[in-house]
Amino acid sequence: MAKRTPLIAGNWKMHKTVAESVETAGQLAKMVADARDVEIMIAPAFTALASVSQVIRGSAVGLGAQNLFWEEQGAFTGEVSAPMLVSAGCRYVIIGHSERRQFFGETDETVNRRIGAALHAGLVPVFCIGETESERDAEKTFSVLDKQIQKGLEGFVSEDLSSLVVAYEPVWAIGTGKAATPQQAQEVHAFVRSKIEERFGGAMAESTRILYGGSVKPANVRELMALADVDGALVGGASLDAETFSQLVHFNA
Ligand code: 13P
């Protein structure tokens, strides 16, 4: 069976003004115009979404947001809803990033609600999971991931989740320069796929893309992308510069 189309996704986190975002996105759109057999996404800050959407229109680069709130509208000061993201040009939304879990009270339950709202609006959820360093040291990696998957996807059936993207981001690898080894990544990705198969069946397990995130760089992207169960990358630091991110997009060139 053909391998799943890889997705190379850039999470810009809390970086770049509107002008800086537009500049980087415009450069990137040109640099990746020749990329084949790869899907590309960037997730700028909320403030830059609408402007970036204009710049990348018609290009190979898709737009994502970094979070959403599950209600569609109402008295929820400071929040942004799924229909608002769609109206700003988004196709993807990152959900449950470890920084949201760590700093903003995100739980498996709120992740679950956000995924539901994304699906309802037709957005592709990029559902983030990952263990901390102390959890790995205590040999709890698989139980932690199992719980995040079960609770995060509770109540859904495979038909709901046909667009789902999972991102495995070991917390100890994020922003540290210490990526998972190919062996560590493949072991976890195969485990995640087996859990999806248990819950949702073989067809969904085969078609679901599982991205790796955590210190992905031009120097290690090829060996990670060559792994059987790695279907793309969720990139932080190395996505901020158009030239560097373009190198990641061209991993198979
Ligand atoms: P880095 O690529 O900077 O390690 O960040 C990974 C990440 O958190 C992407 O969501």
Image (cartoon, helix red, strand yellow):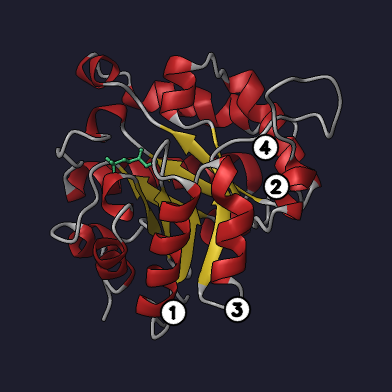
Does 172 sit left or right of 240 as displayed? left
Give the residue at mark 4. Answer: 115
User: Do the numbered discs 3 and 2 sit on residues whose CB atoms are within 8 Å?
Assistant: no
Q: Residues within 10 Å of mark 2 (few under 14, many from 20)?
A: many
Give the residue at mark 3. Answer: 58
User: Do the numbered discs 1 and 2 sit on residues whose CB atoms are within 8 Å?
Assistant: no
Q: Is mark 2 within 8 Å of ligand 1?
A: no
Q: CA distance from mark 3 to mark 4?
A: 27 Å
Q: CA distance from mark 2 to mark 4?
A: 14 Å
Q: Earlier in the sequence, mark 2 or mark 4?
A: 2
**Residue depth check, mark 3 versus mark 1: number of the one nearer the observer:** 3
User: Do the numbered discs 3 and 4 sit on residues whose CB atoms are within 8 Å?
Assistant: no
Q: Can residue 3 be seen in the rendering of this structure?
A: no
- The one of 160 and 83 positioned closer to us in this rendering: 83
**Residue depth check, mark 2 versus mark 4: number of the one nearer the observer:** 2
Above or below — where is 14 with respect to 106? below
Measuring from the top left, give residue 70's x and y in whole percent: 75, 30
Q: Can residue 2 be seen in the rendering of this structure?
A: yes
Q: Earlier in the sequence, mark 3 or mark 1?
A: 1
Q: Quadrant of the C terminus?
A: bottom left
Q: Earlier in the sequence, mark 3 or mark 4?
A: 3
Above or below — where is 238 with respect to 60? above
What type is the residue that disc 1 sits on? Answer: Asp
Q: Earlier in the sequence, mark 4 or mark 1?
A: 1
Does 203 sit left or right of 170 as displayed? right
Q: CA distance from mark 3 to mark 2?
A: 18 Å
Give the residue at mark 1. Answer: 37
Give the residue at mark 2. Answer: 85
